[in-house]
Image: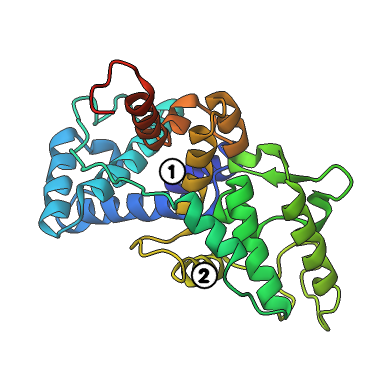
Amino acid sequence: MSLEAFVSYLRLEKKYSTHTVNAYQRDICEFLQFCETVLELQDFKEVNYPIVRNWIVHLVQKGISNRSVNRKISALKAFYRFQQKIGSVASMPFSNHQALKVEKNLQVPFSEKEMLAVLDKIEYSNDFEGIRDKLIVELLYATGIRRAELTHLKLAEYDAINHTLKVLGKRNKERILPLISNVSMAVRDYIIAREKLTTIVDPEYLLLTKSGTKIYETLVYRVINKYLSKVSPKVKKSPHILRHTFATHLLNRGADLNAVKELLGHSSLASTQVYTHNSIAKLKEVHLTAHPRNKEQ
């Protein structure tokens, strides 16, 4: 019952996405099952930190990465904070826990040359899917929206007069994103092709499959991987890398960090600052090239 209440709390009060709620629930169930089957402990209220340490050791021995272990512990912390809040437990069993060390996963953005190539130099088919696929690439690069946000875009949220797009982000936070003229034209061309579909199952959504249903996240990943593979040798080609590319290119060209934060839909500036390492590298390059004290010019 306590887990059910926690899941409802995440969904209704915290307004977490279905994907996040399911991940939290899965991690907590895994821990409670470990307590019951391995330690013969059935009451989560009796959990202490040595028990948590046993679980961490168990996960590491199974080959679970430190990053994944930290994620599972974060889910448990949230669960026990909730239990403390409603009075089910008196204290947190994580007070002395320190996150496991993880290597920083450097996200390498696409270059401006690669993005110009994928948008202007390769051919997309003239059928519905080709027009839609190019729009997917255009929107992700031009707005920096998340893959889940893209799949949930509504047709009514596109403003053809003001060239804007309303996006529903994490925790149901809305933001209005400006569209540059060529992207707005791409949306217009896509809508014309969309209207020619013989069947539309999900008419409220902007981006559809050729069967007329709302596009899904795996499809978006396949589209990005397919077209970026034609112009880039980078190993990782995903919608998130395009979001990273969007932020990096704006910052490289002098965009204000707070403005980029608002465009990305981040709740804190700290989340946006992870995208600045490439722009700092660019600034160093400019500094070394232009500074009169640099003797290697």
Q: Is residue 67 left or right of residue 198?
A: left
Image x and y of residue 70, in percent: 26, 42
Q: Which residue is mark 1?
A: 2
Residues 215 and 96: in front is: 215
Compare residues 288 and 230 and report the one nearer the observer. 288
Q: Label 2: which residue?
A: 227
Where, quadrant-wise, is the C terminus in this rendering?
A: top left
Query: Label 1 is placed on what type of residue?
Result: Ser
**What residue lies at 62% left-to-right and 43% top-to-bottom?**
169
User: In the shown orientation, is residue 68 left or right of residue 272?
Assistant: left
Rate crowding at label 1 as few (under 14), some (14 to 19) or many (20 or more) other CA atoms within 10 Å.
few
- The quarter holding residue 62 reads bottom left
Depicted 12 relative to depicted 283: above or below: below
Q: Residue furthest bottom?
A: 198
**Tag count in the figure?**
2
Contact, mark 2 vs mark 1 (Cβ under 8 Å): no
Label 2 sits on a secondary structure element that is helix
Number of residues whose C-alpha sits closer than 10 Å to that of mark 2, classed few (under 14), some (14–19) or many (20 or more): many
Q: Residue at coordinates 33% horizontally, 39% vertically from top-left?
A: 74
92 or 274: nearer the viewer: 274
Task: Report the mark closest to the observer, 2 or 1.
Answer: 2
The residue furthest top is 293
- Sequence-wise, the earlier of marks 2 and 1 is 1
Relative horizontal placement of residue 276, taking residue 266 as reference (left or right): left
Q: Residue drawn 83% across and 53% down? A: 156
**With respect to residue 197, does 45 lie above or below?**
above
Tell me: residue 102, above or below residue 59.
above
Q: Is residue 210 left or right of residue 203?
A: left
Residue 39 showing in the rendered view: no
Asked if 241 appears above or below 291 in the picture, the reply is: below
Callout 2 amino acid = Tyr
For label 1, the SS is helix
